[in-house]
Image (cartoon, grey):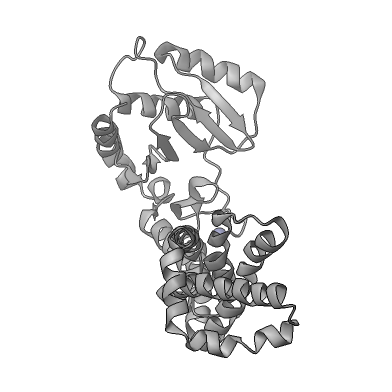
Amino acid sequence: MKTNEFSLLGTELGLTAYGATLCGVVDGWPLTLWNNNVNHVHLIVDRKRDSALVKQINAVLKTWGGKINSWVGNMLVITAASKKKAQGSASTYIQFCVYALGHAGLHPLETCPYCGGGNCDAAALTGKGYRPVHYRCLQAEAGKAHNKADINRENGSYLLGVLGALIGMLVGTIPTFLTVVYLEMEYSILFALIPICAYFGYKLFRGKMNKAALIVSILMAVLGVFILNFEYIVFSIMREYGFSFSEALSFVPDLLRDGEIWAAIAADSLQEFFFSALGVVIAWGLISRTASGAAANADAALRLAQPYGQRAAAPAADQAGAE
Ligand SMILES: [Zn+2]
């Protein structure tokens, strides 16, 4: 289905777009629509797969060229109507699908996935599909996600985070150093490990998980390339002159003060910086999946929630729906 047709379908049925899907309640059935030809209507029903029921429902859906595509646990998926047999608008087909399920004696699963209780008062997008929930449970879930984010915001420490990132960065240089020393090869891609290890160090030491985590990872990505080159220099001094590690280390303060060495490393390390930057991109992906990311998802679920179950309790609304 073309994108504009799909969004028109959403408007006709009163559904809300979420990513590539539409979700909402149609004739008392919470459901999700996927815009592809195989997995079209996703519903959570109150029965597990029943072959006799599948036959019975398919016999009805066949008139539109649709059928039950899968029924795993309580998740039932119905295919789209076939172009040849479609007898009317796409929205009529969706209504026909839920009618066919109701006619076969199925109902939406009215068990809240969070507390396991009944008498749900809202429909919402959960990790297990768009389905009836308790609004208070959904709020509690969002509250938990926000708490987690808040705890990190309040208790996280920049200082400890930077310390952890430094240690992580040093650990991240080890694989490259060892491959150079023992295999005499340099795999530039290993430079990506430097900011990734720095990020994990930052997280492990309870650094505040906000943009600072990214900035620290970038700084460590740059610093790590220099540190690694200084590690090589120290190692070369040991090997060339037969110095011990502590003797070689005594040269380091002089090396660090020498601006020319820094400049030479910077000029020689374009490729290393490139792969280190790649690691920053990966670290950024990890950062966006943190507590504040989970809180944002929970907020989205709250926004997509709508009242559910009141229709049966309020006859006035029922009459309005029947007109
Ligand atoms: Zn609940």
Front-lying residue, 128 or 258: 258
Quarter of the rendering occupied by the N terminus: top left
Residue at the location (49% across, 30% down)? 102
Q: Is residue 275 visible?
A: yes
Q: Residue furthest top?
A: 84
Q: Quadrant of ligand 1?
A: bottom right
* Residue 196 higher or lower than 97, as above or below: below
Q: Is residue 115 left or right of residue 153?
A: right
Q: Is residue 157 visible?
A: no
Quadrant of the rendered structure where residue 88 is? top left
Quarter of the rendering occupied by the C terminus: top left
Q: Is residue 132 left or right of residue 84?
A: right
Q: Is residue 242 left or right of residue 267?
A: right
Residue at the location (64% across, 77% down)? 234
Residue at the location (48% across, 35% down)? 42
Quadrant of the rendered structure where residue 70 is? top right
Could you say where residue 236 lies in the image, as x and y percent from the top left?
A: 65, 72
Residue at the location (73% across, 81% down)? 243
Could you say where residue 246 lies in the image, as x and y percent from the top left?
A: 72, 87
